[in-house]
Amino acid sequence: MQLGNTVHFNSFKWVKEELRQLLVDAQRQLEYYVDNPEDVGKLDEIIASLRQVRGTLSLVEVYGAALLSEEMEMVARALKADEIPNRENAFEVLLNASIKLPDYLETLAAGNKDVPMVLLPLLNDLRACRNASLLSENVLFFPDVSVATAAFDQVSEADADGANENPAELAGKLRHSYQLGLLGWFRNQDTENALKRMHQVIGKLRSASKHGKSKRLWWVALAIVDSLRQNGVESSVALKSLMGKVDRQLRQLASLGEDQFVSELQDELTKNLLYYVARSANTSKLVTEVKAKFNLERFLPDDAELANAERQLGGPNQELLGRVSEAIQEDINQAKDALEVFVHSDRSDSQQLKPLVPLYAKIADTLSMLGLGRARESVLQQKVQLEEKLSTGLIPDEEALMLAASALLGVETELEAYVDRRIGATDTAGAATPAEDPKAIAENQRVIASLVNESLKNIALVKDAFLNLIESPGNLEHIQVVPSVLKELSGAMFVPPLDSIRSVIDDLHAYFSTTLLGGRHKPETREQDVVADVVTNIECFLEAVAENRVDSE
């Protein structure tokens, strides 16, 4: 069902009611467990409900919502395994997600597109609960963190007393003060003074730092605290986790000295902090400077712009797609290089393949944000199989290596098609063929519109009849009318591009008239799913033709 991710054009509506009930059950179970945390068995019910939600959403290819339910399930599993130190935070985020997921699905049912990027802050919160890497670290957010901060090296009055101190010694002296502020903010106790304390510590470190790389980290962290003090960004679980990591950077600086600290400092923390600066709503001088210096508006459009881009183009804008394509291709090339090196070695050490695991995970994360769920599943499957072999010390055989490489090639192909479809949509939208008579084109479009309108009514009859059969498997009277409806539908498919699905409709007609009615056959669950897919694809195709969408085939 590779028909784009517009829920109006896929089979989501077939399972909408089932999903609603599953989510209601999951929310009630979660609320009960929060009030009765000693009832650990309730977590099994929550996990089962969320797994069913995820499976259903994946089946109908609503991948953004499926990813959210998957992250919720993983937090529930981590709670059951007692792997989450701050359970209160996990409860809060899970409850928030259980409320927002049904709301998100309602927007999809109304005809809006599945935009996984909009869910990124909530996904980050869920990941932070179990101390997993944040998606903002490597997914659709590519600021240039190599930007130097020398142009903003002025010392403010608040930071002046730290300007001439040794950064490592200063970090050792001020870390306790930062921790007190951090704790007050975490506990929501005298938040204003807690954030003021954090602001003073980071400001002094920024002024005292001699290296641009460390100064950049403190500068960005200072912008976050500045935004928090002005309520420009939410005090989310993910952001609290990041500011906790800032504390660990103070410890590293104090113990290593600035030179070694800078040599070991990675860009991931700065990049994640920049994501939340980009989302900040306040317009203080510092936040504005950081946004301008890193050109964050270019790298992260707001939710409204994302949704608008999705409605208009069927996906992220062309510039963003180009950056995503380059980034994921770089990851794919690294993974292919690692496979090639292993293949051409003596293959005695499977640990040579260890770098592939995070690379496959990173590729899968990016695919999930693009809504390319099937490609993501393929990559994740290879990641899991690779992890299993590495954990047992087994050497992957030739077939396993071929499958690992094939998954990467499949990603390249699907990503290329995805980008081409969306760039093609922007290049060709509204364009008419000069050689054709405009009047003839208009008349042909009117004919197609009329045919599609009537055909959709017929498809609705087929869907209703088949749903009734599923509810009452033994009562074939529900589908008596289907063969004649499908025959009429096939007859209407006489003009291009409608004629391209005529054979599919004819096959469906034969199935209903011969297999079901003629053979008094009761379809099994898998068979029901296949029929539902076929009927839904016919409907998707008709809707796509009516909308003159480029991905109708």
Image (cartoon, grey):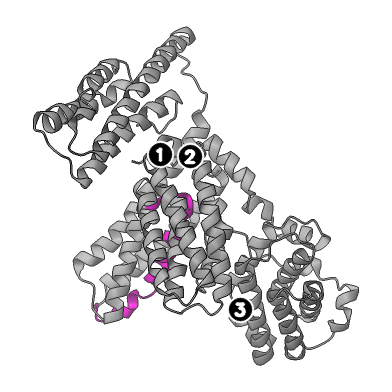
Residue 333 drawn at (x, y percent): 40, 61
Q: Which residue is mark 3?
A: 265
User: In the image, 42: left or right of 483?
Assistant: right
Asked if the residues shown at circle 2 and circle 3 are in contact, with their CB atoms under 8 angstroms apart, the answer is no
Q: Amino acid at mark 3?
A: Leu
Boundaries of the magenta span: 347-373
User: In the image, 407: left or right of 297?
Assistant: left
Residue 86 drawn at (x, y percent): 56, 77
Q: Which residue is mark 1?
A: 13
Residue placed at 37% from the left, 43% from the top? Answer: 15
Residue placed at 20% from the left, 67% from the top? Answer: 398
Q: Which mark is residue 29?
A: none
Q: Is residue 354 above or below residue 65?
A: below
Q: Nearer the viewer, mark 2 or mark 3?
A: 2
Asked if the residues shown at circle 2 and circle 1 are in contact, with their CB atoms under 8 angstroms apart, the answer is yes
Report helix, strand or loop for mark 1: helix
Q: Amino acid at mark 1?
A: Lys
Residue placed at 28% from the left, 30% from the top? Answer: 465
Q: Is residue 524 magenta?
A: no
Q: Which residue is mark 2?
A: 109
Q: Amino acid at mark 2?
A: Ala
How far is mark 2 from mark 3, CA to CA? 45 Å
